[in-house]
Image (tube, rainbow, N blue to C red):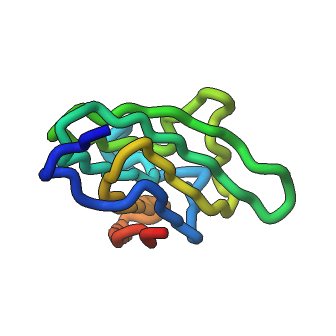
């Protein structure tokens, strides 16, 4: 299948450090502690993305399925994912993101457990 010359990125990404604090400080929903995946699709067709979570003491969860339109971005708040199960709060996890065409994945975490908030953002590891 021709993805077009505009498709950049990879089809598989790994994020070894995942964590959503169990509580927050500040107004909802803007200051709710969360992790977000920014998924960029520069290609010429919609992409299906599957997210699988891995844990230290249980079997993986997922896949969580999201779509990213052609030449669009989708900002997925991990704490809002519920199907096949809610992403657990206060629990370390890792993620593998798989797409049916090349995408670029960035991870951002907002930790608002105290008034002095912490924000982290980094590119995921392309596999």
Which residue is located at x 86 percent, y 60 percent? 57
Q: Is residue 39 above or below residue 64?
A: below
Above or below residue 85? Residue 73 is: below
- Residue 2 lies, in percent from the top left, at 25, 41
Q: Residue 115: x and y, percent?
A: 37, 64
Q: Nearer the viewer, residue 45 or 95?
A: 45
Q: Report the side of 47 relative to 83 (left or right).
A: left
Q: Can residue 74 be spotted in the picture?
A: yes
Residue at left offset 50%, top offset 52%: 97
Residue 116 can be seen, yes or no? no
Q: Residue at x 43, y 69 (%)?
A: 126
Farthest-out residue, top: 83
Residue 35 occupies which quadrant of the picture? bottom left
Left or right position of 107 against 80: left
Residue 102 in percent (x, y) is at: 33, 52
Q: Quadrant of the N terminus?
A: top left
Q: Residue furthest front?
A: 1
The spot of residue 59 in percent (x, y) is: 83, 50
Count all numbered tags in the image, as a single digit: 0
> Residue at point 13% right, 51% down?
6
Horizontally, residue 85 falls left or right of residue 75, namely right
């Amino acid at each position: 299948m021709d993805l077009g010359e505009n498709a950049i990125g990879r089809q598989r990404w790994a994020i070894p450090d995942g964590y959503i604090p169990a509580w927050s400080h500040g107004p909802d929903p803007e200051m709710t502690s969360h992790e977000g995946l920014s998924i960029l699709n520069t290609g010429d067709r919609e992409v299906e993305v599957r997210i699988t979570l891995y844990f230290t003491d249980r079997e993986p969860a997922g896949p969580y399925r999201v779509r990213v339109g052609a030449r669009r971005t989708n900002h997925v708040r991990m704490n809002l994912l519920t199907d096949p199960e809610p992403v657990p709060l206060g629990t370390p996890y890792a993620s593998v993101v798989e797409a049916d065409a090349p995408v670029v994945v960035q991870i951002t975490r907002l930790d608002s457990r105290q008034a002095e908030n912490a924000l982290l953002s980094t590119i995921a590891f392309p596999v």
